[in-house]
């Protein structure tokens, strides 16, 4: 049997007609940049995330970058964030000349530890950039509380977490802004790159609309030095189709995760994902913690099972960030997670037989001497 880490062809086959119809409509209109499809998607996403507004941009990375730009973050400023995340959470900070300050993660959820966030705050802190890793919200209340006391905005990198919930609140709706990615592997993935910022703050939304379009309200009149980061109408058309299925797909991921939890629960060496009470984890990734991780990964790949390490090098130890002066040992939990975690296939079209095969192979690996 072959089990891919992610098989998007199965999903496409189920919605081929609707997608092709939506894409054809855009070609017939020849309206490719922003326009009515993008506006409609912005309205639908704002509704889905329970925010007042949403602004479509070219990627999740740009959603973060533009939000930081809108807040005027730059040289001399500090932004507290996690070292255990995708690269662009942190590159967005350094690109603006600001300094990322790393708060270590909670070893159970792999999300930023609120106590570490509070400890990292200084008079230079201009924002806290929280990531809801793998699709599970971080412990937001203590973070929001500590930030509110100091008047610091909280930004949510919800790129992996569309539809996730924390104590009844949607990921991306709790801080000043929520940043989303429509990279094809996300629970809501486009046919290429795309992103969105959701916010209740109308002023911020207006700033983002300007900044994503070269900083101009009116064409050829520039109030700020913005960038070209508009969402394509073709992406919006595809995403509007897929949005109708998002909840059903996420529910299937949740059911697949529960099945893995049962199948893998008996393997002593293995730690299944912990879901904090009150959280809706939408399992963009199903990540286990195991000893001999690299050997297991090779064994699974040799058995035709796709698996991946998210992420092998915590960001404070990346070569390009060495100028920050961080050292091994600075964020021990992130460093340990980088050595011990492995993502298994969890996509909605995964069959029970495929999951049984994955579980069998993992069990076989740990029963070998
Ligand atoms: C946590 C996180 N932040 C940021 C991004 C960047 O999103 P994009 O790939 O759309 O630029 C991603 C996805 O790749 C992500 O998973």
Image (spheres, rainbow, N blue to C red):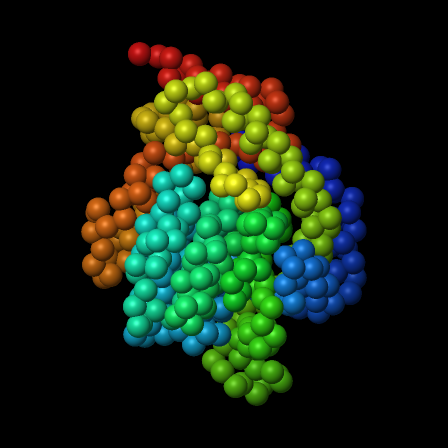
Rendered location of residue 358, percent (x, y)? 50, 22
In this picture, residue 42 sits left or right of residue 154: right
Residue ID at (43%, 76%):
72
Work out which quarter of the rendered image holds the C terminus and state it: top left
- Location of residue 27 by image quarter: bottom right
Rendered location of residue 151, percent (x, y)? 42, 72
Residue ID at (71%, 54%):
240
Q: In the image, is residue 217 above or below residue 56?
A: below
Question: Can I make out residue 128 in this image?
Answer: no
Question: Can I make out residue 67 in this image?
Answer: yes
Q: In the image, is residue 289 above or below residue 244?
A: above
Rendered location of residue 112, percent (x, y)? 39, 51
**Tally of numbered tags:** 0
In this picture, residue 329 sits left or right of residue 274: left
Q: In the image, is residue 224 above or below residue 291?
A: below
Work out which quarter of the rendered image holds the N terminus and state it: top right
In this picture, residue 240 sits left or right of residue 256: right
- Location of residue 350 by image quarter: top right
Q: In the image, is residue 367 above or below residue 241?
A: above
Residue ID at (79%, 61%):
28
Residue ID at (62%, 85%):
218
The one nearer the camera, 270 or 93, is 270
Rendered location of residue 342, percent (x, y)? 41, 33
């Amino acid at each position: 049997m072959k089990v891919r880490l992610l098989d998007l062809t199965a999903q496409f086959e189920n919605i081929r007609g609707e997608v092709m119809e939506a894409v054809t409509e855009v070609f017939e209109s020849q309206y490719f940049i922003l326009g009515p499809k993008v506006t409609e998607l912005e309205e639908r996403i704002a509704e889905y995330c329970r925010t007042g507004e949403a602004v479509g941009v070219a990627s999740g990375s740009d959603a973060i970058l533009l939000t930081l730009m809108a807040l005027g973050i730059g040289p001399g400023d500090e932004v507290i964030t996690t070292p255990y995340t995708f690269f662009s959470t942190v590159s967005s900070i350094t690109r603006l000349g600001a300094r990322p300050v790393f708060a270590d993660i909670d070893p159970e959820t792999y999300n930023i530890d609120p106590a570490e966030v509070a400890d990292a705050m200084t008079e230079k802190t201009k924002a806290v950039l929280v990531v809801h890793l793998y699709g599970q919200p971080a412990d937001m209340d203590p973070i929001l509380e500590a930030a509110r006391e100091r008047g610091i905005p909280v930004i949510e990198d919800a790129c992996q977490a569309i539809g996730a919930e924390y104590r009844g609140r949607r990921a991306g709706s709790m801080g000043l802004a929520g940043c989303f990615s429509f990279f094809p592997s996300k629970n809501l993935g486009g046919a290429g790159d795309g992103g969105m910022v959701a916010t209740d703050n109308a002023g911020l939304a207006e700033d983002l609309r300007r900044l994503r379009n070269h900083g101009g309200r009116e064409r050829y009149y520039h109030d700020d030095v913005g960038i070209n980061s508009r969402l394509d109408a073709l992406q919006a058309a595809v995403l509007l189709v897929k949005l109708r299925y998002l909840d059903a797909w996420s529910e299937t991921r949740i059911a697949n995760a529960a099945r893995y939890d049962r199948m893998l629960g008996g393997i002593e060496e293995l730690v299944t994902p912990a879901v904090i009470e009150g959280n809706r984890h939408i399992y963009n990734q199903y990540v286990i913690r195991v000893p001999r991780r690299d050997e297991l990964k090779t064994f699974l790949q040799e058995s035709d099972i796709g698996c991946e390490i998210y992420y092998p090098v915590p960001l404070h130890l990346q070569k390009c960030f060495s100028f920050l002066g961080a050292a091994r040992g600075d964020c021990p939990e992130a460093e340990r997670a980088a050595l011990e975690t492995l993502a298994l296939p969890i996509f909605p079209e995964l069959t029970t037989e495929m999951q049984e095969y994955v579980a069998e192979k993992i069990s076989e690996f740990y029963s070998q001497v």
